[in-house]
């Protein structure tokens, strides 16, 4: 079973260039309460390495590229994000890691809730225990 749920985003481009829209409860399957983005990452330094208990997210590489590893405790999938008009869903209780950032990568993330450190599981063994409990 693939963990990869890609989301095709509407491209409203014309001769002036592309315009991509993300709206809550449409392309993004939840109320968007927070938006954050990463840039200036180094290709040899990975990020993430956590799961969220409740939070759902959608990630879009709006510039450059990076890889996202998704892991539900049984299956692992790696998705290469290269297209500013394709997002990937990162649901709650999915361990995720971001790898191989290109120099120009800007990774935009839409989240279903405000930042809450208590929602993070940052230890992989604890993640497996939660999954199996
Ligand atoms: P973290 O989620 O650990 O980054 P990553 O998973 O990409 O490696 O966040 C890095 C730091 O930023 C951490 O101290 C928490 C803080 N942070 C916020 O304060 N608000 C936020 O919305 C996010 C995503 C992180």
Image: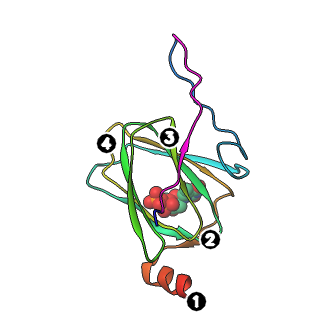
User: Residue 2, relative to residue 30: is it above or below?
Assistant: below
Residue at mark 3 to residue at mark 1: CA–CA distance: 34 Å
Give how far across and how far down residue 25 sits, in percent.
73, 47
Q: Which mark is residue 102?
A: 4
Percent x, y of residue 78: 37, 58
**Front tag of 4 and 3:** 3
Does label 3 or label 2 sit earlier along the sequence? 3
| Mark 1: few/some/many CA within 10 Å (<14, 14-19, 20+) | few
Position of 129 relative to 112 (above/below): below
Q: Secondary structure at mark 2?
A: helix
Residue annotated with mark 3: 86
* 15 up-or-down from 43: above or below: above
Give me the C-alpha separation between circle 4 and circle 1: 38 Å
- Mark 3 vs 1, N-terminal side: 3
Name the element at disc 1. loop
* Precedes in sequence: disc 4 or disc 1: 4
Residue at image location 68% in from the left, 57% down from the top: 114
Residues rendered magenta in the picture: 3-15
In percent of width and height, residue 83 lies at: 43, 37
Whether tag 4 and tag 2 are in contact, CB under 8 A, the answer is: no
Q: Locate the C terminus by quadrant.
A: bottom right
Magenta segment's dominant SS is: loop
Of the residues tagged 1 and 2, which is closer to the observer?
Answer: 1
Q: CA distance from mark 4 to mark 2?
A: 29 Å
Which structural element holds mark 4?
loop
**Which residue corresponds to mark 2?**
119
Q: How many marks?
A: 4
Which residue is labeled 1 in the image?
133
Q: Earlier in the sequence, mark 4 or mark 2?
A: 4
56 or 3: nearer the viewer:
3
């Amino acid at each position: 079973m693939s963990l990869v749920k890609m989301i095709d985003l509407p491209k409203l481009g014309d001769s002036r260039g592309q315009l991509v829209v993300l709206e809550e409860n449409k392309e993004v399957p939840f109320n968007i309460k927070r938006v954050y983005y990463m840039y200036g990452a180094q290709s040899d330094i990975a990020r993430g390495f956590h799961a969220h208990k409740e939070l759902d997210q959608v990630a879009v590489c709006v510039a450059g590229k990076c890889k996202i590893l998704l892991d539900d405790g049984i299956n692992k999938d790696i998705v290469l994000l290269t297209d500013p008009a394709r997002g990937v869903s990162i649901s709650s209780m999915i361990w995720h890691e971001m790898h191989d950032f290109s120099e120009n990568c800007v990774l935009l993330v839409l989240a279903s809730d405000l930042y809450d450190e208590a929602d993070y599981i940052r230890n992989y063994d604890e993640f497996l225990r939660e999954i199996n409990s």
